[in-house]
């Protein structure tokens, strides 16, 4: 384990790191970023915990079996939205963009205050969950192997 200062600061920083990762995922259809980048930021929060508290204590609270479940949920979201477009026209068709839930289809050109990502923000959530689960599992397994060697 690291010093008390590192552990205390990482305890304070873990919540902002996770919130920032979720922010990147949720605004990926409007700004640079998205599911992969936000998932990598979420996994960096797990890396912060591993460095600060050690892999053994992190392994007690975050087991590797949780991360494949997280990845599977993300992949199911992504694939179901991809196949959902086939009901309207084609694979990966953005079928939610004109639905009553997500608003009408915006006109071409600048439309201040009117934005609809349709299925794209939901796909970003699926990708973010998959990437966060996969990278976190890799980090935890690598930390446990390095400690055992």
Image: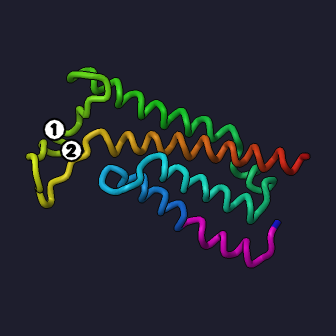
Camera-nearest residue between 62 and 31: 31
Q: Is residue 70 magenta?
A: no
Q: Which residue lies furthest to the right in this view?
A: 149
Badge 2 marks a residue whose secondary structure is loop
* Residue 63 as seen in the image, left or right of residue 127: right
Q: Which residue is drawn at 53% across and 60% down?
A: 18
Q: Give the range drawn in magenta.
A: 2-15
Q: Residue 102 carries which label?
A: 2
Q: What residue did someone put label 1 on? A: 98
* Crowding at mark 1 (Cα within 10 Å: few <14, some 14-19, many 20+): some
Q: How far from the left and from the top, in percent, is residue 96?
A: 23, 36
Badge 1 marks a residue whose secondary structure is loop
CA–CA distance in space, label 2 to label 1: 7 Å
Q: Main secondary structure of the magenta part?
A: helix
Q: Does the magenta stretch include residue 4?
A: yes
* Residue 109 as seen in the image, left or right of residue 46: left
Q: How far from the left and from the top, in percent, is residue 78?
A: 41, 33
* Residue 123 as seen in the image, left or right of residue 20: left
Q: How far from the left and from the top, in percent, is residue 91?
A: 31, 23
Asked which quadrant contains residue 117, the reply is top left
Q: How far from the left and from the top, in percent, is residue 51?
A: 74, 62
Q: Residue at x 48, y 62 (%)?
A: 19
Seen in the picture, residue 98 relative to 53 is either above or below; the reply is above
Seen in the picture, residue 5 relative to 41 is either above or below; the reply is below
Q: Residue at x 67, y 43 (%)?
A: 137
Contact? badges 2 and 1 (CB < 8 Å) = yes
* Residue 75 as seen in the image, left or right of residue 134: left
Seen in the picture, residue 75 relative to 48 is either above or below; the reply is above
Camera-nearest residue between 69 and 86: 86
């Amino acid at each position: 384990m690291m010093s008390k200062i590192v552990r205390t600061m990482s305890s304070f920083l873990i919540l902002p790191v996770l919130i920032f990762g979720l922010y990147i995922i949720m605004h990926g259809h409007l700004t640079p970023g998205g599911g992969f980048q936000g998932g990598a930021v979420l996994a960096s929060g797990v890396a912060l915990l591993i460095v600060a508290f050690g892999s053994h204590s992190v392994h007690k609270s975050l087991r590797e079996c949780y991360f494949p479940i997280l990845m599977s949920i993300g992949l199911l979201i992504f694939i179901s939205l991809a196949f959902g477009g086939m009901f309207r026209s084609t694979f990966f068709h953005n079928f939610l963009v004109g639905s009553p839930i997500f608003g009408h289809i915006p006109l071409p050109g600048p439309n201040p205050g009117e934005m609809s990502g349709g299925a794209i923000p939901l796909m970003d959530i699926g990708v973010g969950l998959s990437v966060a689960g996969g990278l976190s599992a890799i980090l935890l397994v690598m930390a446990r192997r390095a400690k055992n060697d």
